[in-house]
Amino acid sequence: MLVQTLSTFPRMFDSTMGESMMKRAQEKGILAFEAFDLREWTYDRHRTTDDYPYGGGDGLLMKCEPIFEAVEDILGMNAASEPTTRVIFLSPAGRRFDDTYARELSTCERMLFVCGHYEGMDERVYTLATDVVSLGDYVLTSGELAAMVVIDAVVRKLPGVLGAACGADDESYAHGLLEYPQYTRPATFRDMEVPEVLLSGHHANIEAWRRQQSLARTFVLRPDLIERARQAGALSSDDLQYLDSLEGVPEEALKSAIMFPHAKNPNEV
């Protein structure tokens, strides 16, 4: 996969793309990355990429001319029409980003992220977009930060990026539910014990425990995901029976026993 970014602060990507998993993905040849400076497509001595909005108002808007020229130069005039190429803008008005969307984007061959700054962008630049993405109901300082989140979520789904062969398949949201709690050595730490079932070596029991923990966490934290899984027919009869058993349990007891069981005050976690 080729990932490219266009922004006024391209060096913001240096640490994210030069460390850990992103770095290894590039070393393995799974990922290629390029960060372009939008100022390279400006022609005044101040390398201006923004201006005041028509009609007045606070802040500055990203100008459309350098963005159009840059995207067309980077992709070529017809590249944006290729089905395996996505031109992605980040905006609160975009499609909400989630695991399903990340999986969809991971099938692309090329992504170009156009990162805004200041108060926003001239509305005309969105005619270049194949995707407009929102991370959620909040505002960030710049599109670079949002792009890093999307890139990380997408690249980790590419085959060979994670150490485990199926590492991304068992994470939170991969099957529509939150992930079960996990533990490693030592088995006892400051009087906190690893659940006995995980030490049993009984794989069927372990899998059953993990499934129930996943269901319980999702039931408490994200009931909307449980309802979505019901509607999609993604829950087995055993799942439904277990969820029915949780209905009468007080919420505080569930939080204490199942969600973050070692926290001193689960309500504040």
Image (spheres, rainbow, N blue to C red):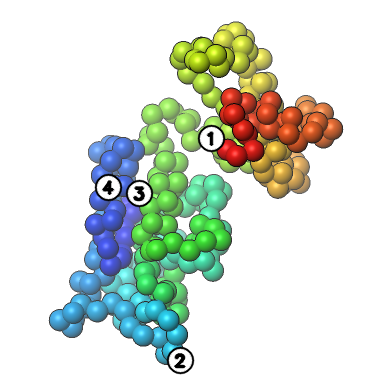
Q: Position of residue 219 (x, y in %)?
A: 71, 38
Identify the secondary structure beneath mark 4: helix
Q: CA distance from mark 2 to mark 3?
A: 42 Å
Front of the two marks 3 and 1? 1
CA gap, disc 1 to disc 4? 24 Å
State which mark lies toward you, 1 or 2.
2
Question: What is the x, y in percent for residue 31?
Answer: 31, 45
Q: Which residue is mark 3?
A: 1
Is 110 on the left-hand or right-hand side of 242?
left
Residue at 58% of width from left, 29% of height from top? 263
Going by the image, does 238 lie left or right of 189? right
Q: Residue 169, can we see it?
A: yes
Mark 3 and mark 4: Cα distance apart in space: 19 Å
Query: On the image, numbered disc 2 is attached to which residue?
Result: 55
- State the SS at label 2: loop
Res 213 quadrant in image: top right
Front position among marks 2 and 3: 2
Q: Does dot 3 land on a helix, a strand or a loop?
A: loop
| Image coords of residue 6 (percent x, y) | 31, 64
Q: What residue is pinned by disc 1?
A: 171
* Tag nearer the camera, 3 or 4: 4
Q: Residue sitting at 48 percent across and 30 percent down?
A: 166
Quadrant position of the C terminus in the picture: top right
Instruction: Give whichever of 31, 18 is nearer the camera.
Output: 18
- Residue for badge 4: 15
Please, what is the three-letter code of the amino acid marked with disc 1? Glu
